[in-house]
Amino acid sequence: MAKINIESMKKIISILLVFICMTSAYAQEKLHFNENGKFKIVQFTDIHYKCGSEESAKSIRMMKEVLDNEKPDLVAFTGDIVTDTPAKNGWDEVLAPVISKKIPYAIILGNHDDEHDWTRRQIMDYVIRKPYCYAQTGPAYLTGEGNYVLEIKNTQGKTGAILYFMDSNAYNRVGEQKGYNWFGFDQVEWYRNNSAFFTRENNGKPYPALAFFHIPLQEYTLLPDTTKNYVKNAPVFGNRTEKECPGIINTGMFAAMVEGGDVMGTFTGHDHDNDYIGYLNGICLAYGRFSGSKTTYTSLGYGARVIELTDNERIFNTWIHSSDNNILYNVKYPDSFIKK
């Protein structure tokens, strides 16, 4: 009998796991633009949920109000969602508003989600089994837990837009320098491969795409300082009251997105006192609005970011929906960022 190559078996198992993940995802109803050619996403980030906390109860009430008013097609939870024990109860309570309204949702993790009684893998394994969850654990061979792609079908039933969800990881554990982690080179390559695949599928034309992850890219720090008077062609809309805290090493994810030509905007959390959106090299760099209450630091109040895509166009509108039901910083990509 021929010897079984262990490395070959590992690769086969990884491929089978990816296939299983894809099969389970595609078994759900496809995400699609509505009859008016719109697809709306509500982003909740940094809820820092704690079971039994009245402050966290305020966050849940805000979530319900935003969902009732915005009526999204998808909810994106972008990390630091449940940051206390027991994790299971916390995730059950945080996801209850979207599940009760039968709204599809996606999840990526932040740097605080796995600091208590569940690992990142345990969290993802649990939430992907919940009703209406479109998140996936992602390829087993990739850095992180929860790297996956969601397609939005257009009114003709074909792919109309792409959503990338990526694990920006947590803390650096290599070498002496302390700080936040970064995208692995394998994650950058994974994005490149997916972007190239979908572009080939669309006869060489990149699909409109958005990317969601928790920790901002280093390129966020390159946006013009709105406290100075030299901002002309690339305005920044929203609050920028906290120094950005990106990963300490730049592994080229933004460069890959610029070269890929599909991503119109990246949407993160992490820095609670920022909710701005800026523009650099054709891509919007945006924060969500902090969605927790006073279970952690904040000076802005809480709420959500809303993003609305339009079928067959490389545009999106986005705004902040605050907890007091005000609509703030309503902008359009790319028109609001390009001087006519």
Image (cartoon, rainbow, N blue to C red):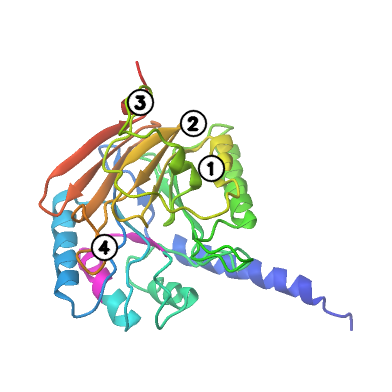
Q: How many labels sit on residues?
A: 4
Q: Residues within 10 Å of mark 1 (few under 14, many from 20)?
A: many
Q: Kindly report the distance in space between the C-alpha atoms of the residues bearing marks 1 and 3.
A: 22 Å
Q: Which residue is mark 2?
A: 281
Amino acid identity at mark 4: Tyr
Q: Position of residue 153 (x, y in %)?
A: 40, 45
Q: Quadrant of residue 51?
A: bottom left
The magenta-colored residue range is 93-109
Q: Kindly report the distance in space between the C-alpha atoms of the residues bearing marks 2 and 3.
A: 15 Å
Q: Kindly report the distance in space between the C-alpha atoms of the residues bearing marks 4 and 3.
A: 29 Å
Between marks 4 and 1 in the image, the one whose residue lies nearer the viewer: 4
> What secondary structure is found at the residue carrying circle 2?
loop
Query: Do tag 2 and tag 1 residues touch (Cβ < 8 Å)?
Result: yes
Q: Which residue is mark 1?
A: 254
> What secondary structure is found at the residue carrying circle 4?
loop
Q: Position of residue 173 (x, y in %)?
A: 58, 69
**N-terminal-most mark, 4 or 2:** 2
Between marks 2 and 3 in the image, the one whose residue lies nearer the viewer: 3
Q: Kindly report the distance in space between the C-alpha atoms of the residues bearing marks 2 and 1.
A: 10 Å
Q: Which residue is mark 4?
A: 297
Q: Is residue 154 left or right of residue 17?
A: left
Between marks 1 and 3 in the image, the one whose residue lies nearer the viewer: 3
Q: Report the quarter where the C terminus lies.
A: top left
**N-terminal-most mark, 1 or 3:** 3
Q: Kindly report the distance in space between the C-alpha atoms of the residues bearing marks 4 and 1.
A: 28 Å
